[in-house]
Image (cartoon, coloured by chain):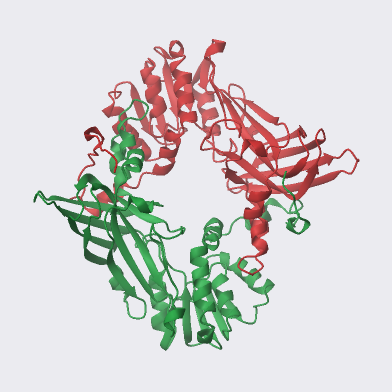
Chain colours: A red, B green
Amino acid sequence: MTTQPEHHLVSATDNSKLPFSEQHYFSSYDHFGIHEEMLKDKVRTLSYRDAIFHNKHLFKDKIVLDVGCGTGILSMFAARAGAKHVIAVDMSNIIEMAEKIVDLNGFSDKITLLRGKLEDVELPYPEVDIIISEWMGYFLLYESMLDTVLIARDRYLKKGGLIFPDKASIRIAAIEDAQYKEEKIEYWNDVYGFDFTPFINVAMVEPLVDTVESRSQVTNSAELIKFNLNTVQIKDLAFHRKFSLTCERTDFIHAWIVWFDMEFPSDRQENKITFSTSPHDPYTHWKQTVFYLNQVLNVRRGEKIVGSLASRPNKINPRELDIEISWDHKTQSNRAKKGKFNYFLR
Amino acid sequence: MTTQPEHHLVSATDNSKLPFSEQHYFSSYDHFGIHEEMLKDKVRTLSYRDAIFHNKHLFKDKIVLDVGCGTGILSMFAARAGAKHVIAVDMSNIIEMAEKIVDLNGFSDKITLLRGKLEDVELPYPEVDIIISEWMGYFLLYESMLDTVLIARDRYLKKGGLIFPDKASIRIAAIEDAQYKEEKIEYWNDVYGFDFTPFINVAMVEPLVDTVESRSQVTNSAELIKFNLNTVQIKDLAFHRKFSLTCERTDFIHAWIVWFDMEFPSDRQENKITFSTSPHDPYTHWKQTVFYLNQVLNVRRGEKIVGSLASRPNKINPRELDIEISWDHKTQSNRAKKGKFNYFLR
């Protein structure tokens, strides 16, 4: 039995007299679950809060634009940090909840919420001093809103204005993953006595978004690409980059993992907030992205693997990504093992 | 480092020469993930296998219809059990994978796969001896295919034919759940210093599908309804039933939980296979369904809670469910605590 302090009692509205159509309304907020998951991701939310609160002098009396505001949490951080006004834009009906919450917390006169596509809405100010946005998706770019942030930058950001965050880099490493590859890929070899191998191709093509144990990492990691949000162009988001990894122990390699690191701006080095979604850092809801090789590499400490990764928006659905990874493992005995595989993040 | 036996090496097709459009195809199977989850649910899949394999005498030389065959696993169980012929129907493109798998396992002449709605496809036999189907959803009835199974029964099942499974009952109990209710509901009282209480209503309305620890259960459980698939009519799936629960200890009650139990037919009592999705039984992917009360009941051992639960398909989207739960807690001191709340399973 747990004690139940009085102040913890829930006071949900008695909805039993409402027609079910209104309940439907209550439960119809787009992606309510994902907003809950994002808010509860403390690495994410506290990084934004710290980046804003540790740099209140940058926000004081400034006009701020929040691109894809969701529940409005970042806009309220900016308002509390002293912004003159915050414009919060979101396409989803979650903005109706944001409106209630902004009102409830006394920010109605400080935050203007606009529902619609950023390209379509009319802002109450011709330009803004700061853009804040939490636009990152799995693999940084999957279903990301970065293109919208760049449109906002080009259209509304004052010369010399700031973007929170303003740097994003994608990193790659290789892992030993026999047990999980067994569960996810080899599983299909014998399903209750039947041969289900046609599913191996299906399972291989789709990268897994999952948490990887840091001790699985066999190589060092390499930066694939770094985006400077102050200058990057939408076309740069399709990229093809080489990588070189060094094996830090003798082991098998079953998969590549990809993660991203973020950086917020500040005029003071000590106030620059960063966070990483690497397996060596605390959990985030972005986890890591795992790409299984269609072979196993048997590597020795000190050996090099060179390769390349290409990522492009899918032609039919540009929010999905076509990803091609190729590799060339130079062994000490000069027996090279090359490979290439195409993945699809959907 | 893990040893990597040679027979575990994956032989995924090298897809690097395929155009991305074909990869798209590979990864476009509807709900691939859910089929994986269902197959890996051993309670589910082994119950079907045992119900079929322990009753091979019932399947020998029989015509079997598999309603919503998915990957074809149940059809292959039936074929392996000696069925004369199996007709497997599914609307989803997963049936293309089922076709490959059936072929690969040598059942092409025993299993006929038909893509389409059961109401529309033309069966190669005018009637069948046995219907097999895994139609159950969360809360038994959410997004379930039971209505399609009943249509198949009325249209194709021989008089005296069998349905696997043929009994399904829904049960209710009450739980102490302070910690999780705190995380899911009270959380919104203070989100990084802001008042997010409008989300409490949103969170309350949507029941949670989650695993409940068996020690959370405070009352006994009661059967809400039992469906006999041999006789039940589609209209019976909307129901309103009373329940009476007895508190087995002095504790708080925060939520109702609902689960279901299944039963397969046999002519021999000892061959009747059953399984339960209760919190006292091994994990299934159906978990339990949790409905938070908008109050906390303070109960004493031996006290009774009477109530009722109504479940009806939503008028706009009949695969979604409108659920109303009311309760009346009779305390020993004759202080009754009544309540009622409407939920929406979407």
Q: Quadrant of residue A142?
A: top right
Q: Using the image as rendered, state which of residue A149 and residue B203 is in the foreground.
A: B203
State whether residue B91 appears in this view.
no
Q: Using the image as rendered, state which of residue A94 and residue A126 is in the foreground.
A: A94
Q: Quadrant of residue B330?
A: bottom left
Q: Using the image as rendered, state which of residue B146 and residue B166 is in the foreground.
A: B166
What residue is at 37 percent from the left and 14 percent from the top? A82
State whether residue A200 appears in this view.
yes
Q: Is residue A319 left or right of residue A307?
A: left
Query: Which residue is outermost to the left?
Result: B334
- Expressed as whole percent of the image width and height from the top left, the position of residue A30 reads 40, 44
What residue is at 29 percent from the left and 57 percent from the top? B173
* Quarter that holds the N terminus of chain B: top right
In the rendered view, tell whether residue B61 sits above or below residue A225: below
- Expressed as whole percent of the image width and height from the top left, the position of residue A158 reads 50, 16
- Expressed as whole percent of the image width and height from the top left, the position of residue A271 reads 52, 14
In the rendered view, tell whether residue B29 sits above or below residue A260: below
